Amino acid sequence: MEDLRVGSLHFLLDLSQPLYEQILDQMSGAVARGEIALGQKIPSVREMAQALRVTPNTVMHAYQEMERLGLTETRRGQGTFITTSEQRVARFRDEFARRAVQEFMEKMHHLGFSWEDILRYLRETRGGGEDQ
């Protein structure tokens, strides 16, 4: 696992997983958490590739996926920017959360845990009672 920084962005890259997916996940997560401001310019493909020690095609693939998700926009001659649409980011956050919960629930259910067990573990892990 490699721990790298690109400006204010922090990346942990695991060479056993597709790098473009990791870049996409970590950058989109940073957008969803508000760590990258709406409208902020992000590093060029070349800058990001050099800093992360990956090929420009890897970064380009991640950037194209971010644009497809509506998280970025490319301005010809200016670069790539995080969207200025709060609604797009809010929608992405909602979809991201729902997908993560769904994947977790399916994995736990596949392992043989009942829905009640899963909810109990969530409450316990969260540190408390049902009203929290």
Image: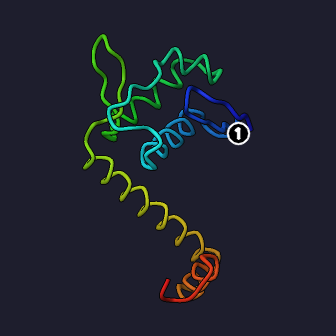
- Most extreme residue toward the top is 77
Find residue 124 and report its horizontal and vertical position in percent. Answer: 63, 82
Residue at 53 percent across and 16 percent down: it is 47
Residue at 53 percent across and 84 percent down: it is 115
Find residue 77 and report its horizontal and vertical position in percent. Answer: 30, 10
Specify few, some or many for label 1: CA neighbours under 10 Å numbering under 14, 14-19, or 20 or more: few
Q: Is residue 75 above or below residue 108?
A: above
Q: Name the residue under label 1.
A: 16
Residue 31: name its quadrant.
top left
Residue at 58 percent across and 78 percent down: it is 122
Q: In this view, does 2 lie to the left or right of 26?
A: right
Q: Is residue 57 left or right of residue 66?
A: right
Residue in front for this viewpoint, 47 or 14: 47
Question: Could you tell me which quadrant the N terminus lies in?
Answer: top right
Identify the amino acid type marked 1: Ser
Residue at 46 percent across and 49 percent down: it is 33
Find residue 96 and report its horizontal and vertical position in percent. Answer: 42, 55
